[in-house]
Amino acid sequence: MAKLPAIPAIPPQSVPLDAQARRAVARRAMRPPSKKGGGFQLFLLGVGVIALAVFAAPTCVLMVFGMVPSIVAYVVDRGKRPMLAFTIAPLNLAGLMPYLLELWTGHDQMPTVVHLLTNVYVWLVIYLSAGAGWLVFMGMPQVMTFVLQRSLDGRKEKLKALQSKLRADWGPQVGGGEDQI
Amino acid sequence: MSVQPQANPSMSTTSGATVRLKDRFDIHYDKPLPGLRSPAAPAFVAEDIKTPGTRHFALICDPKMPPRLEAVRKLQMLKSYGVLTPVEVGAVDWAPANRRMFAMVFEQPLGDRLAGPTDNAITPWGEEALVAHVVAPLVQTLLDLDREMLPHRGIRPGNIFFRDANRRIAMLGDCVTAPPGLYQSVVYETIEGGLAQSHTRGSGTTAQDLYALGVLVLHLLFGKLPCAGQTEEKIVEDKIKRGSFYALVSEQRVPTGLSELLRGLLVDDPQARWRLGDIQMWLDGRRMTLKQPAPAIRAPRGFEIDGEECETARHLALMLDMQEPEVAGRILRGPNFETWITRTLGDKQVVEAINTAFSTRSESAAGTSGQTAQLVSRVLMALDPPAPIRFRDAATAVDGIGALLAVTMLTGGDLMLPSEILSARLPQFWSLRQGSAKGEDQATIRFFDKMLRYLDDKRPGYGIERVAYEMMPGLHCLSPFIEARYVEQMRDMLPAIEFAVQAKTIDVSPIDRHIAAFIGVYENNVDDGLLYTLIHADPATRVLGTLQLLAYLQETYGPPMVPSLIQLFGQQAKPVIERFRSRYTRARMQTGLTAILKENSLRKLADYLDSADEQRKDAQRFQKARLEYQQTIKQVEKATQQTGELMSTAKLAGHSVAVKIASLISSAIIGVTLFAMGVL
């Protein structure tokens, strides 16, 4: 097995930090877009919807109307990856699932679909579940910010404490002050 | 004076009214012997505790006058009965003076002095008795001394004893307790010796002893000091103008039998003066032909100074020396002087020497007046080459410069004078004027060039102090810390420093410029670099340098215990320990120091504080810590940078987590729904 190249413990001091940051940004820019091949997927989705409409029209209608929040989220999310849609869609589907089951376990007929779609509580359940997804989507970055901030602060405190200890043990010269030797 | 018993056996101890010298002689300082004293060295009874019954006396040297220690060594090797020879010498704790003094123990002569130390008038001696009982034994002694190249330089009636109670064999007295010729009357000195200051006459040669012997013969013969009643200046001037023989004999009639001897001994030209072999032949009854010295060139017309007509260059030099340097300088630069020298006197050698004197560059810290004084001094040397170096108020033989420097230091005089003599290269100029054997001149010039280098070197171990110890062997260390301990050999140095620390005379650095120079002269093994550390800017390096130096002295000479010095260094160890960067190392060193101090060894303390291994380890650990610190700085910077990017990162991560959470929740809801509706 070929040996991995040794990873230097410390980056070379000659490289300035802002240069490292620029390099990191450049690496990120070079990542292939996540929506590569999105047209084909959309085509497959279209084919699936048409097939569903042909073979299970009530289910198709209920899903089209019930998954509107997810579709909207997909449309409005202009990110490289439609994270909003990915968050809302599962919960949206979970909200829709009781009515899909009701449809599948009862008579899979259009009047049942109409009955369901005319029931305001059905809409409320479906949209609340999608809203919950939206809330999760909106809230998680705040939570992550809080967690990461705490983590970084803790790390910096530890480093500062180590610096203080080194200074106490070796004097200010350890930090690059005037060398008396 | 509280006299501390010393561990060093070579040092003296005291008991009652006695002080012991080197475990052999008890010197009774309550029993003076006025009949045996030297002018500045009182005599006391000394008892040989190893050989009771012998009669000894001790001379206690004046600490302001350096003794002739080289002469002591030569005399001890010579073991001549014809001169008082020190049996034992050394410094002793001299309670009456509340300090240490240099003592010399001699065997007491059986006979008494030829005359009292201050007696100018004495009973005249008969010609035969004089030759048989004084001249013959003294010549024999001088022959012994000449073999060791040791001029006595103290031949005078007050310094001559008899080896027997019947006063039949004369012997020379003390010649070692003071600089050569110090207590000689000007009458007993040659013209050159008379021109010099009494303490700077230098060792000279046996020829000067023979001149003094000639004066002694005259003195004993007539029963009174020649030229008695005249001032010293007048005596010297008379000798210059008339020649020593005529100046000293004056109107008196010299017996025919001694005339030849006196004429031979009192010749002013040392080359033409009788030598010891000539006197021996004369004593054996051979009649000698007097060597006629070349007469001094006389000018047909004298050069007038202060109404005095100077016909010879030597006389002119004397008269110029009597003037103030500025006045003499004006005379020298005047047109009459040049005319007189070149046309009237017409001595080519003098003209050439004066030209050299004028062309020699004069540089002086004293400015123009200093330059004039240097010019005058050089011209005096050109006019009268054998005369001593005369510069401002100093008049010194070239081999008396050491004594000049030493006495100036001992008496707290102005050191500028001897310094300027050396800086102006006057001894070198004097040497070049002598026209003696070339090798001798060159050796003198090289020696003084070396002294000049030492003088100009301001680092510890050099400077004027080093010059003094180099030029005056036997001069004790004149450091204010230990001067009263009379350290004249290295083995006494550390006990003296320990004593000074104990007496709180030393409270900071135990080594000053004098001690450093003394060590530099007598310790070839001490590296100059070690001496330079004594003035290092870093206090720790200074302390360590001092400690290493004293540790070397303790290892080499002892004593094994120096508790006060150890404590002093214990107090001064802080900056040394502070050199270690690690506080743990510092704490460990500080803790271990107490145990090391208890061991009372300067070497162990030096090795402990100056451990190269500890320093290397400390430096390595420090580099490691420094590296670690640099890494923490980078990591803190990275964390700060990450804080700046926190929002975007948290957004990405939050959305990703939101997807996962939504997936999990929805899976759970779907599962529950399926279960509740009986699908599962």
Image: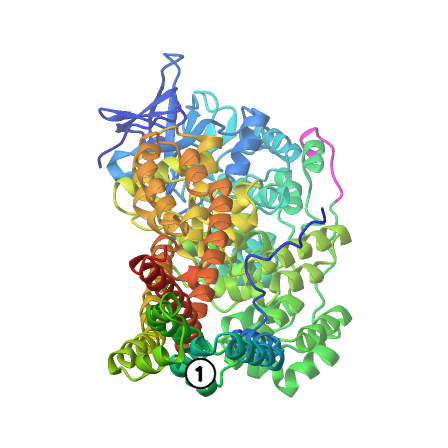
| Quadrant that contains the N terminus of chain B | top left
The residue stretch that appears in magenta: B282-289
Residue displayed at 61% across by 64% down: B426
In this rendering, the answer to whether B51 lies above or below A61 is above
Determine which residue is flagged by label 1. A71
Q: List x then y, in percent, for residue B20.
A: 33, 24
Residue displayed at 58% across by 82% down: B331
Q: List x then y, in percent, for residue B215.
A: 54, 45
A149 magenta-colored: no
Tell me the crowding category of disc 1: few under 14, some 14 to 19, or many 20 or more residues within 10 angstroms, Cα based: some
Task: Say what secondary structure mark 1 lies in.
Answer: helix
Helix, strand or loop: magenta stretch: loop
Q: Is residue A7 visible?
A: yes
User: Quadrant of the rendered structure where residue B250 is?
Assistant: bottom right
In this rendering, the answer to whether A20 lies above or below B506 is below
Foreground pick, B267 / B378: B378
Instruction: Kindly identify the amino acid type of the residue bearing the numbered disc 1.
Output: Ile
